[in-house]
Image: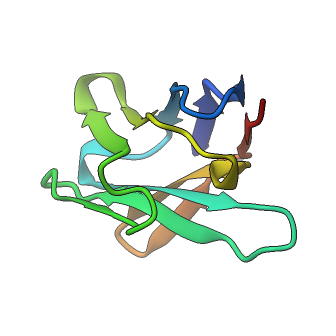
Amino acid sequence: QVQLVESGGGLVQPGGSLRLSCAASGFIFSSAAMSWYRQAPGKKRELVAGISSAGIISYADSVKGRFTMSRENAKNTVYLQMNSLKPEDTAVYYCNAAVYYYEYWGQGIQVTVSS
């Protein structure tokens, strides 16, 4: 059974930091391309960052220089370090795994940036 479990969300003030984690199980993690998406109220889900099985990372323009994605294959976990957070980063953040012909989603975790 595939599971993607996000953690680390919450409420933070503008300019603050959070680190999201996504613990994966049920598939060959090292072969998967992993991504973080987010969806703000009333908006479409958007890609935030992705990391290939080879470790190549890409970011949405809106988060470049502020967010850092990484993976730790030994722990079957990906991370999203979010710095200099802005109110517009407020959204539900989702972990995504793409492996072979399959795609999986986590349940999502709320990140709220507000003073």
Position of residue 60 relative to residue 24, above or below, is below
* Left or right, residue 15 beside residue 87: left
Q: Which scheme is used to colour this image of the protein?
A: rainbow
* Left or right, residue 46 beside residue 33: right
Give the image location of residue 6, x and y in percent: 61, 34
Image-quadrant location for residue 114: top right
Q: Pick the quarter of the image with the C terminus.
A: top right
Residue drawn at x 69%, y 47% is: 87
Image-quadrant location for residue 76: top left
Residue farthest to the right, as pictured:
42
Report how many numbered discs are placed on residues in the image: 0
* Left or right, residue 29 beside residue 11: left
Residue drawn at x 33%, y 57% is: 64
* Left or right, residue 30 beside residue 88: left
81 or 26: which is nearer to us? 81
Position of residue 67 relative to residue 98, above or below, is above
41 or 1: which is nearer to us? 41
71 or 1: which is nearer to us? 71
Give the image location of residue 101, x and y in percent: 42, 75
Q: Pick the quarter of the image with the N terminus.
A: top right
Give the image location of residue 74, x and y in percent: 25, 24
Residue drawn at x 40%, y 34% is: 79
Residue drawn at x 72%, y 77% is: 44
